[in-house]
Image: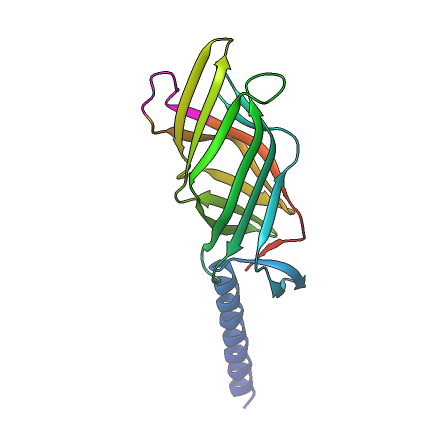
Amino acid sequence: MRLIKMLGLAAIAAMAAMALVGVTSASATSTQLCTAHTGLTCSSPASSIHLVNEGVFRLLNELNPVLCLNVLIDATPLALGSPQSLHASSLALENCGTNSTHDNCEITVEELPLFNLLKTGLDEGSLTATNGQIYVICEQVLGWMTIECTFDSTGLLLAVAAGHATANQTPITEVGNSPLCPSQRRIDGLLKGLSAAYVLG
């Protein structure tokens, strides 16, 4: 009888362990952006997010980096997933330039990006663009040149943590085939949420 009880307890413990593994696996395979949580449970899924730059946002290269003073991204999280998709409803880069007054460049969004948000840790994740295109025209570069470039943001990667999204010299590819545009530039800057947002599973 004692052996039967021990086997029964062992079976219960095994089932509990399997259930715990199942919960852990499920949470590891899903991502959800939330505006509030209880413990690690999302209590209020985000319906929209608004990101603005914190400091200067840079489109870098070795010759003529473009600096933008104002960046705004509005996006709508879609269904819970692994990863969760976020659709950008608006994207603006303003007061941009290669000069000290940041006014000789204009950036036009030709295709709004779709992002994939993947949870990688406790309130941490990666945000990857799956499409998107911007057109950049700068006049009077180095005092005389006009440069026109089109960039594809597919694969653009930002690290997400504590309500911020960071581009750390992330490559962005030029697709306009302009001889004056480098084949690759890098995006560098910090974006912060205008309201609380947490990366949960």
Image position, residue 129 (x, y; %): 44, 43
Magenta range: 177-185
Image-based side of 68 in relation to 137, left or right = right
Say how the picture is coloured. rainbow
Which of the pair 181/124 is nearer the observer?
181
Judged from this view, the residue extending furthest toward the top is 143
Judged from this view, the residue extending furthest toward the left is 177
Image position, residue 27 (x, y; %): 52, 62
Image position, residue 131 (x, y; %): 39, 43
Which of the pair 5/95 is nearer the observer?
95
Image position of 125 with respect to 175: above or below: below
Who's the residue at 52% across and 84% down the image?
8
Who's the residue at 63% across and 19% down the image?
101
Image-based side of 106 in relation to 151, left or right = right
Judged from this view, the residue extending furthest toward the bottom is 1
Image position of 75 with respect to 13: above or below: above
Which of the pair 120/33 is nearer the observer?
33
Quarter of image, res 109: top left
Q: Is residue 178 magenta?
A: yes
Image position, residue 161 (x, y; %): 61, 45
Q: Is residue 41 magenta?
A: no
Who's the residue at 45% across and 24% down the image?
137
Which of the pair 20/164 is nearer the observer?
164
- Label total for image: 0
Q: In which quadrant of the rendered image does the C terminus lie?
A: bottom right
Who's the residue at 49% across and 71% down the image?
18
Type of secondary structure dominating the magenta stretch? loop
Q: In which quadrant of the rendered image does the N terminus lie?
A: bottom right
